[in-house]
């Protein structure tokens, strides 16, 4: 399968997973505790975030958004946020996504590049696709709080 087709199928899976996760959230069908295990616990989430932040730093499409960011603080917040999101014992106490991204003029294209950087990090760490889609559905649900600008690609 070529890379473009694979990426298109993955984006379709993300949208489908987002719809399913949001639809079934009230039914209690997702077992977040098992996702935490699939991410490798806190050590696995920490390794994932280190890879993800490295991917973002090397991504010329979006790395300028992070030029003045305190990277250790960002990693700490992301580890806690992802750990909590996948059912771990961590607690995210940082700002809301709206507050954290205020004034950054994040475009849909930038959000999509960031999402791809996370997918690449999860693939590197061999996170199972179901667990990936669970986290991507959560990320997708945050898009309206993060994307605040229009650009040439959205």
Image (spheres, grey):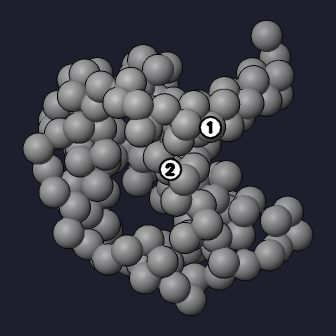
| Residue 90 visible in the displayed image | yes
Which label sits in the foreground, 2 or 1?
1
In which image quadrant can residue 16 be found? top right
> How many neighbours does mark 2 have within 10 angstroms: few (below 14), some (14-19), or many (20 or more)?
some
Name of the residue lying farthest toward the right: 152
Q: Quadrant of the N terminus?
A: top right
Task: Tell me what residue is drawn at x 11 percent, y 44 percent.
Answer: 89
Name the residue that disc number 1 marks: 19
Task: Tell me what residue is drawn at x 16 percent, y 57 percent.
Answer: 91
Q: Are marks 2 and 1 in contact (CB under 8 Å)?
A: no
Left or right placement of residue 29 versus residue 37 in this view: right
Q: Is residue 53 or residue 90 the one in the foreground?
A: 90
Name of the residue lying farthest toward the front: 27
The answer for how far apart the CA atoms under marks 2 and 1 are is: 12 Å
Q: State how many labels appear.
A: 2
Task: Tell me what residue is drawn at x 23 percent, y 37 percent.
Answer: 87
Left or right placement of residue 54 versus residue 43 in this view: right
Give the answer, above or below, for where 55 lies relative to 107.
Answer: above
Percent across and percent down for residue 57 are 49, 59
Task: Tell me what residue is drawn at x 55 percent, y 37 percent.
Answer: 23
Q: Secondary structure at mark 2?
A: helix
Percent across and percent down for residue 113 are 65, 52
Name the residue that disc number 2 marks: 139
Percent across and percent down for residue 35 are 30, 26
In which image quadrant can residue 47 be found? top left
| Residue 7 visible in the displayed image | no
Left or right placement of residue 100 versus residue 3 in this view: left
For residue 4, the mark is none
């Amino acid at each position: 399968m070529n890379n473009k087709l694979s990426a298109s199928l993955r984006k379709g899976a993300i949208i489908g997973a987002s719809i399913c996760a949001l639809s079934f959230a009230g039914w209690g069908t997702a077992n977040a505790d098992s996702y935490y295990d699939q991410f490798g616990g806190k050590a696995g989430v920490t390794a994932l975030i280190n890879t993800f932040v490295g991917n973002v730093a090397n991504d010329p499409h979006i790395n300028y958004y992070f030029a003045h960011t305190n990277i250790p603080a960002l990693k700490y917040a992301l580890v806690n946020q992802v750990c909590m999101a996948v059912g771990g014992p961590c607690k995210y106490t940082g700002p809301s996504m709206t507050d954290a991204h205020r004034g950054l003029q994040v475009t849909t294209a930038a959000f999509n590049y960031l999402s791809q950087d996370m997918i690449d990090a999860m693939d590197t760490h061999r996170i199972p696709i179901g667990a990936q889609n669970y986290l991507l559905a959560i990320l997708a649900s945050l898009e309206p709080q993060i994307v605040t600008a229009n650009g040439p690609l959205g």
